[in-house]
Structure formats: structure tokens, C-alpha cells
Amino acid sequence: MISKAEILILMPEIFILTLACLILIVDTFSQDPLRRVTYYLSQLTLVLTAVLVIGFSPEQTVYAFGNSFISDGMSVVLKTGVFVISFFAFLYSHEYLKEHGWLKGEYFVLGLFAILGMMILISAYSLLTVYLGLELLSLSLYAMIAMHRESTTASEAAMKFFVLGAIASGMLLYGMSMIYGVTGSLELGTIATNIESNGDNPLLVFGLVFIMVGIAFKLGAVPFHMWIPDVYQGSPTCVTLFIASAPKLAAFAMAMRLLVDGLQPLLNDWQGMLIILSILSMATGNIIAISQTNIKRMLAYSTIAHVGFLLLGLLSGTPSGYAGSMFYIITYALMSMGAFGMIILLGRKGFEADELAHFKGLSERSPWFAFIMLILMFSMAGVPPFLGFWGKWFVLKEVVDAGFVWLAATAVFFSIIGAYYYIRVIKFMYFDKADSMTAIKASKQMRFALSVNGLALLILGLMPGALLAICVSVLSIAA
Amino acid sequence: MIEQTVFYIFSALLLLSAGLMITVRNPVFAALFLILSFFSTSAIWLLLEAEFLAITLVVVYVGAVMILFMFVVMMLDINLSALREGFARYLPIGGMVAISMALSMVLVINAGEFGLASDTVQRHGADYSNTKELGVALYTHYLYPFEIAGAILLVAIIAAITLTMRGPRSSKAQKPGEQVLVKSTDRLRIIKMKSEGADSEPEKDPLAESKLAQSEDITVKKESL
Amino acid sequence: MDLFENMEDIYLAIVLAPLLGSVIAGLFGKLIGRSGAHWVAIAGVGVSFVLSLLAYYHLFYNGGEVYNAAVYTWLNSGDLHFEIGFLIDQLSVTMMVVVTFVSWIIHIYTIGYMVDDPGYQRFFSYISLFTFAMLMLVMSNNFLQLFFGWEAVGLVSYLLIGFWYKREPAIFANLKAFLVNRVGDFGFLLGVAAVFMHFHSMDYIEVFEQAPALASVTVNIWGDESWSLMSVICICLFIGAMGKSAQVPLHVWLPDSMEGPTPISALIHAATMVTAGIFMVSRMSPLFELSETALNFILIIGATTAFFMGLLALVQNDIKRVIAYSTLSQLGYMTVALGASAYAAAMFHLVTHAFFKALLFLAAGAVIIAMHHQQDMRKYGGLYRYMPITWITCLVGSIALIGFPGTSGFYSKDAIIEAVHLSTLPAAGYAYVAVLSGVFITALYSFRLFFMTFHGQEKMDKQTWEHLHECPRVVTIPLLILAIPSLIIGAWFAGPMLFGDHFAGAIHVAEGHAVLLELGSHYHGEWYQIAWQFFVHAISHPTVILLAFSGVFTAWLLYIKFPTVPEKFANNLSMIHRLLVNKYGFDDFYQKVFAGGAKGIGRLFWQMGDVKLIDGLMVNGSALSVRWFSGKIRQIQSGYLYHYAFAMIVGLLLFLAVFVHKLI
């Protein structure tokens, strides 16, 4: 039976669901073309849910609802990360939608549902909840992309994402059914112990391959990455920003739950798969990004390359490796949010600043935001002392410690190739003449948020110890 | 023995109808074959004593979803030749992939792995309620996933409405009350205009009130000039 | 007292106040305007100075404890702890007071000197930043932070030498300074790395504690040759000091650095940064004491610098360059003291030198202002009539420099000479002769400068002469303030610093090397008694004083009495003169062999390697091929949904084949 304690543990999820429904109703009655009430209520919901998550964070790992829900250190940290990032993403989105004139209240409601999906995914401890969380998240995202009906590219992106996502979740589900069939349990902990006691079985690896496809698709690892460039480029920039940031944390959590919590005994198998995915991703992402002229598409390939790096930490198979990956994904989410935020900042009604050429001469138009973009690009390229460098450093260190020196060398090699296209953006900003000297039109909030976003990379980069310590401590308890 | 015979009949029917569903040219037939495959599945579920699921499948999918689907298929004019274009071209490579996938599955999966080879399905008495068992499981042990599923459906509804609704549409019905109240001046307005091609006139705001008077003023001024 | 309870906060404030000032002046310079910038910078350093005094008081008079702790752990990575920590003992607190005091005075002086400069705010931002970096260096408790400070002061120095970045020589000079320092830093980094490799720690105290145990360890660097570990570490570290403190043969950057604004020459290239090497060696005394090889090496380098660089000052005509060579020579003196294990004497000379050399530079700066940025002394003369304050302060600086009895330079220099005399190291004999004859040279060039500038015939052009007047008070007051310690601080601190327990615990001297202890056995009592005994000793053993006076006398003869004589000397002894003017050919040699050679090799590599191989084949080639490749594989991204789905299924099959069926 369900106890009161279990309900309490689930409080943040219940709260956000209730508020999302409430906001939906409030929005229906709202006449305001700027949807201020909806927007502010959504932001308030995020803040309050964050407070609840931190407030209800358990001392040690707690399971609820027949072990289908887990609340541990990792879930608290990742959820908090999701809230912070979503808060910024909502802020940027509101600015973007206002400017481009298709502001709809449902955008934020769907966003909240997507966040609920992420929370469920992060806290999932059974195959069923993993799947449902993933579906809730994906469904909300499909709708958010397609929401701008006038844009044909958005519809195309939504369609591609939807179909490929359906294929991927079909495969995931099939893999899960295999695992369930062999172990007789949906619950991840039991699955792990069953595999441990019953030994090796080709069916398990068979199921694992399908599950791996689902994970790789969600993360965007080669060769399951095909949706990323098209979706990133086709979607409205605010949606791209959202997709490229917070859901990555959830995807990381999904990988952690399935591979580490559930299928740890198959480490040797999934390690091999991750190595292949990682190398392919780093190679493909970094190389193709070079020939892009659209910055959204370039960032999409950069995402793929970053995922390759992220996988390095996971495949090292140690708690500190997972911590490195977690650090990496948080930093990545911050960086990609900032980069897409810059595109929003430079855009205006009827104009998307999504070509690389639009960044030409930015240092003359706005020295400050050129500087912020410089931080973002250097951070993505992994130049010390920016935050991105530390992500790469920790992950590489773990890979070397796990004995894959050649893999670390490959990673460094590809990240050097990758530095080219990041630095090219900087070259455009500082050494090229601007095509037009249009003043940047953006609200104070937007400017402030973006500045905070950029400077955070610098400041956290100067003192990465605290964030890393958090990552290490929550994962060493979990393992 | 009879049970097994029935099982094989329905299984064969299921595979056949599913195969035909994706190969027949006419989409209406395809939908009908899909209905047939649902029926077969439902029969197999009955053999497994899953009465509730079997009935739900017939009621929901066959009764509601598929009928709706039939309507859509019949109403839309789907260009079949476009859909089939390239089928032959991609058949070899697609077939190869399909075969290797099937081979891979066959090599790995066998019933023994799932512990189903020896045991037969456990039988229940007449008072056993399949519906109640499902309900108990859903609302206690699986409450959390059940609620998430509810949230997913809600999102689906919101998404569907957001993506299709284009705001309240103005109806084109007549409004007799307004028709009666209308005055002749609302219908017809006499404006004096000078002939085209004359000296340019200062542009006037067309929405300004008392156009008549204004235009008269202008003509007066003109004359005085 | 409550004030001293939170010393950590005070130490943090000492470091951060200049940084804050720098950031505000630098980033918001336009916003706060010129006066805003100098106020904020001066306030920052002023706070730092007052708090340093407080720390000094706390440690010496209030019975405060030596502070050694990490204030912030940046990162832990295995054995390596990246920490920011402070070691506040007698040594560092002395440096802190000197650095902040001189820096503060120079901040004030800058208001007058840079008054017309467009880069006013930038300048204040830089010098405050320099103060921050220097304090980080001095207060560090570990090698990593030391290295950070070391590089940071180098960087600011680079920026400031090239402050007038539109002037060709300034750019040349800052590049030169940067490159030469790189050579030293390379040695320094090797030293730090060797320390970490063998001690597994970056913390000073931990390293010092382990040092005696590792004294006899030897390492193989080249083949089977085995070297004492301590010698290797110490010589590597000292090479770093040679770069920073401009010792032969890495001295060439310092004279050129005079292209920077004069306040910088005073602060960075005379009083503080260049003494970082001296400070570092004193700090590492527990290591250096374990290697006599290194000490001999230091003695030779220091003595050579002290004597030969002094000689060069004789033929220079640029007023700042004369002082620059004098700085080199004085740094040589300090280095000699280090080699003789008289670390306290080196530190003492460092302190007194900081005051009187900063004074001399600022006085020269005042002259330069008055002469409209004319720096050639041959165009000066007779200035004492027009600039009395500058004249008197410059005289104070000069007599302190030559070691006139009673001035601060007298005590510190005498101590060094005596210490070298007592040292038993093999190189001490050479060093003694060098430093002793250096006294004569010092007096000669100091008063050559003094006479040529302030006395004799007025040789400036008419226009300059008409506008000749004393500098504003914002310039002269710093001169007066600096003149006071230049005169008296030596007498006051000679006793405690040299023979007392001023540096007890902070400096370690091995049994056989305790020259200062031996010297101290002749001096007893309170500070004024010791000062008096010094005086008496100097009179009773008059060699040093006589040398100094004869130097002054010679200068008077040559530049006042018979001003044509130097010309004749130059003509008759053209060989020697040319040798000196060419600065022994160091610069030309480096320019031709290293710079030229590097350029030549560079050109070769550029043409052979870069243009053809790298640009042609690798960069452009690889860039092209990567681009080509990139363009090719992006075609996989066709945009067709079924291609994407197909790719996914192929990927899936691949995984199945590899991991389930083990086909590969």
C-alpha cells in the first residue's frame, strides 16, 4: 500500500503537475498578449519545485512506489540543474516568443510537462518509469517544436524528431522487454542482482543493444544522431535552446539508471558499445561541424561531439568517471544554453541570427556580448580556465585512469580539430567587418541573464572544485 | 488439444492479416486487415484468460480507433503511387536488413530463455475476475506509472489542440436582428469625388468621421482657389 | 586585541584590495574618470599598505604567530593540490611592507608623472594589478602559487614596458624582456617540477622538512653522470631567479625595459619585481643550504653582475639606463650575499635598495618631466638651481647608493662585503674582489650621473631652459617621503635584521655557512649601538669608505673639474670604451646568435616546414582534406527521414553483430 511518506517523497512531481494543470486553466482565461501571468507563474513553479526538491532531499537513498521511484543525491543535483537551466531557458524563450510574435501560453505548460518528464526520468528506478518519463518528455518536446505552425522547417523538424523518436523508443521498449523476459523484473535493482546471480546470457546483451540504441538516440550519439542537426536547425531557436540544454541532463540520468543501476553486471559489453559510440560521435561531430555555415547546425554537431566526450566518463565504469560525466553534462548544458541565447539575443522579428556570418564584427556592435560569446566558444573548445576545459580534463583523466590512454589521445585529437570551428566564430566576431551595424535590441532581463550565463562559465571555471565535489560526493554514495 | 488448434488458427490468421495489411495496395483493405489482426489478437488473449484486455481491444481499437481511421482513409485522397515509389528500388537492401535482423533474433531468442517452455498457463476458477486483478495492480503497485501515463495523455491532448486549433472561427450565419436594425445611411454613402487625373489632393484619412462633410469642404476650398 | 583575531581576513584583504582597485580602474576606467581611477587604485594599495603594517606589527611586536594555511583549495588532483595559501612569516611580512609602501608612493607619484597620458586609467589598473601579483608571489606558501605570482608579475611587467605600445623600441624591449624571462622561467619551472617529483608536495614547509633527508640523493640527468638532486633543483630555481633578477647572462632585458614609464622602472625594475629572485632564493634557503655547488654558482654569477654591470653604467648617457645598470650591479650584490649564505644581508640590502633606488628613479623621473622627456644626460647640467628638492633627494639617493657612512646603503652594503669576506666557499675570493672594487665603480657612476645632471654647465636647449622649474608637489612629496627611509632605515634595522632574530625561523643557514653569525659576534647591544659600531668599524677599516670617496672624487675630477677628460679617455682607450658601449657584446651576441639564429632557423622552418610542409600539406592540406571529407560525409545527412531511420537500423545491426554474435 502507498504510505504517506511515499507521497511526500513524490511531492515535487505532484506539485509541478498540479501547477502545470492550474497554469493551463489560468492561461485559457488570460487575455494578455504577452502572457505575463502564465510566464511568471511558470517561473514561480520552477522556483518552488526546486525548493521542494532541495527541501525534500533525503539523507540517504529512498525508494518509493514499489521501487519504481528513487530519490538519491544524483537525482537531487540533476533535478536542481534542470530547474536552473529551465529557468533560464524559459526566460530566453519568453523574450524570443515575444519578439517573434507567436507567444502562446501552452508553450510554458508543455515546457513544465517536459520538465516533469525529466524529473520522472531522473528519478526512475524501473524500466516502466524510465520509458514513461522518456515518453512524457519527448511528447512535450515534439509539440513544442511543431508549435510554430507558420514555419515549415519547424514542422519538418517535429515530424522527423517524432518518427525517429518513435523508432528509437520502440527499440528501447523491445530491449526492455528482453531484459524483463530474462530477469523477470522491471525494477532496476532486482534486474542487477538477478543478472549477477544467473550469469551471462546472450539475450541480455541482445536486449542491452536495443536499450543502448534508445540511450544513444536520446543523447544524440553517432550513428543515432541523425535527428539532431535537422531538429536543432529547424526548430525555433528558443525550442532548440531548451532541447539542447535541460533534457541532456535527463538523458544522462537515463543512461546512468539503465546502464549503471540496472545493467552494471554487463559493464564489459556496454563499455565496448560506448567506446564505439564515443569515437564515432567525436569524429563525426567535430569534422562535420567544420563545414557548417549555419551556427545552429554547427552547434548541433558540436553537441554530438560533446556527447562523445560525455560517454568517455561513463565508459570508464567508475564512480569518479560517472562524476566526471555528470560534471561534463552540467557544464555542457550551461554552455549550449548560452550559445543559443546569443542567437536569440542577436535575432529580432522576422530575422534569425543563425548564420555564422551574422556574428561578423560583433565586437564592434557590442563588445560586451562579443566577449560573452568568446567565453562561450572558448569554454566549448575546452580552453582553460573556462568551465568547459575542466569538464574535458576530468573526463580525460578518468579515461586515462581506466586504462584507455589511446582513447584519451583520440579524444584530444578530435577536440583539437573541434577547436577550429569554435575559434572561427571568435575570428568572425573580432576580425571581420560587420555586415550591418544594427544595434542589439534586447530587454534588460535578457542581457542580464546572458551575462550571468557567460560569466558563470568563467567564474565556475576559475573554481571548478565545488561543482566537481558535489558530483563526486553524490555518485560515490550511489555506487 | 482443441485449445492448441484454436491458438494456431488465430496465430496464423494474425500473421497473415498483419502481413497483408502492410502489402495490400488499397488503404481501406489495409485498415480492414488491421481490424482482423486485432480480432485475432483478442481471441488469443481470450485463450490466455485475459478477458478484460481482449474486450478492451475490441471495444477501443476495433470499435472506436479503427472506425475513425477508416473514415479518415476514405475521406483523404491518398496518392498511392507516390507512396509506393522506390519500393522496388529499396527492396533489396531493405530486405537484406530485415533478413539479417530476423536472423539475429532467431539465433538469440528462444522460448526457453523466458522460462515458458515447460509450464502451461495457470488456470483460474470461475470466480476469478481478471478485471479486478488488473484494477488492483494498476491502482496500487503501478499507481505511479499509471499516473504518468495519465499525464502523457494530457500532454497529448494539449499538444493536439495547440497544434490544430486556429482560434475561434467566425461563423457565417445570418443575424436577423441586426439586419432589421440597419439604416439606409449605413448601407450607402454618397461621396463627391473629383475626376481622376486632376492635381494631387492631400491624402485624407479614410476612417475620419463625416467624410461627406469633409469632401464638401475640400470642394469648397477648391472653388475658392 | 580583537583586531588580530582574524588575521586570515586581513591577509586576504591585503592581497585583494589592490586587485579590486585594479579591476575597478581597468574595467570601469571610463566611468569613474581619471581622478576616480587614481583614487581607487591608491586607496586599494593604501589599504594594503596599512594592513601590511598591521601584520608586521602583529608578528614582531604583538607576539603573533607565523601564519601558514591554505585559504582556498582550488582543485585536488591526485597528489597535486592546487591551493592558494599564505605563509606569513618574518620574511614575507617584510617584503609585504616594502612592496606595498613603495607601490603606494609610486601610485601617488604617477598622478604627476602620467598627467597628460591618454592611458592614465590603464596605467593605474596595471600597477595595482602588479601589486596584487607581487603580493601573491611574496605571501605564497606553495610553489604553485609562487609560480603563478612569478608569471603574473612577468606579464604585468611585459604590459608595462610596452605601455607606450606605439613606440617601436618599447615593443622591442617588452618582447625582449618577455623572451629572456622565458629562459629563466623555463629553468624555474624545471626546478618546481623537480621539487614536486621528488618531494610529492608543493607546500614550502613540507618540502623544507623533507629536504635534509634528500640531501644526498643523486639523479641521472644525462647518461650515467650522477648529480646531486639538491644542486639540480637549486640551480634550476636560481636560473629562474637569474631571469627575474636580471643576473648575467640573462640581464639584457633590464636596461631595455627602461622604455617603460619611469614609475614602472622605479617600482618594477628597481624596487620590487626584480628582487623577486632574491626573495625566492632567501625563501628557499633550506634547500640552497644543502648545495654548496649551487652557492658557488650563485656567488660567481652575482659577483660578475655586480662588477661588470657597474662598469657599463659609466658609459651610458641615458639617465635611466645609468640607474638601470646600477640596479643590475646592486642586484649582483644581493646575489653575492645569497651565495655567501648571508640571506639576511641580501634581504636587508633588498629593503634599503628598494627605497633608495626607487628614490633615484623617481628623482630621475622628476628631471625627465622638467626636461620634457629628454633623457640624455649630456643635455642636462646645473639643474640644482632650478630643482632644489629633486637635487637634494637625488643626492640622498646617491650617497645611500654608494654607502656613505650613516645612510642605509652603508649598512647593507658593508654587511654584504664583510659577509663575503668571511665566507669560506671557493668562489668567495673572486666575489670579494668584485664587490670591493664595485664600491669604487658605484661611487663613480652615481656621482657622474649626479654631477652631469645637477652641476656643471647648463647644456639644455633654450626652450627647455625657459620652462625649467621644480615639479609639482605630487611628485616632490613622494621623493621626500622616500628620502627618509633611504637615510635612516639602515641604521635602525642593521642590528635586528643582520644579527638579531628578525628573520628567525624564516631563513635557514647551515652550520658551516653562518657568516653573519660570525660577523655578528663583533657587534652587540641595541640597534643604535650596533649602528655606531658599524660606523666605528668603517672608520677603523677604511678600505671601503676610501674606495667610495675616491669614486666620488674621480667623478668630480672628470665631470666638473676637467670635463674634457672623459672624451680623451674614450678616444685613447677606444677598445675598452667600445667594449663597454657595446655592453660586452651580450646584446649583439644574443641578437645575432639567438634572435638571428632563431629567425634564420625560423625562416628555414617557415619556408621548408611551414609554407611547404605544414601550410601546404598539413594545415591547408589537412584543413582542405578535413573540409573535403566533412563536405562528403555531411551528404549522409541527406534530410530524408528514411535515410536516418536506415542509419539507425544499420547501427543497431552493427552492434548486434559485434556484441551479441561476436562477429568481429
Image (cartoon, rainbow, N blue to C red):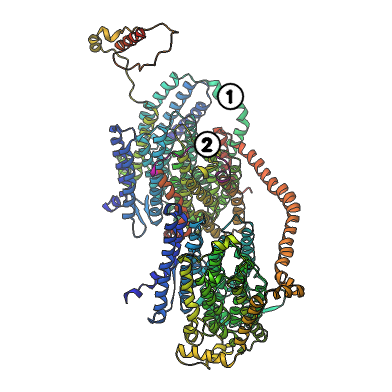
Which disc is residue A436 wearing?
Answer: 2
In the image, C387 versus C293, the foreground residue is C387
Count all numbered tags in the image, as a single digit.
2
Against B154, is C366 above or below?
below
Q: Amino acid at mark 2?
A: Ser
| Residue C225 in the image, given as x and y percentages of width and height | 71, 78
Q: Amino acid under label 1?
A: Glu
- The label shown at residue B85 is 1
Horizontally, is A214 left or right of C341 in the view?
left
Please identify, in this view, whether the residue under mark 2 or under mark 1 is nearer the observer. Answer: 2
**Do discs 2 and 1 share a chain?**
no
Task: Identify the main secondary structure in magenta.
Answer: loop
Q: Residues within 10 Å of mark 2 (few under 14, many from 20)?
A: few
The range drawn in magenta is: A428-445
Chain assignment, label 1: B
Say what secondary structure mark 1 lies in. loop
Residue C249 in view here:
yes
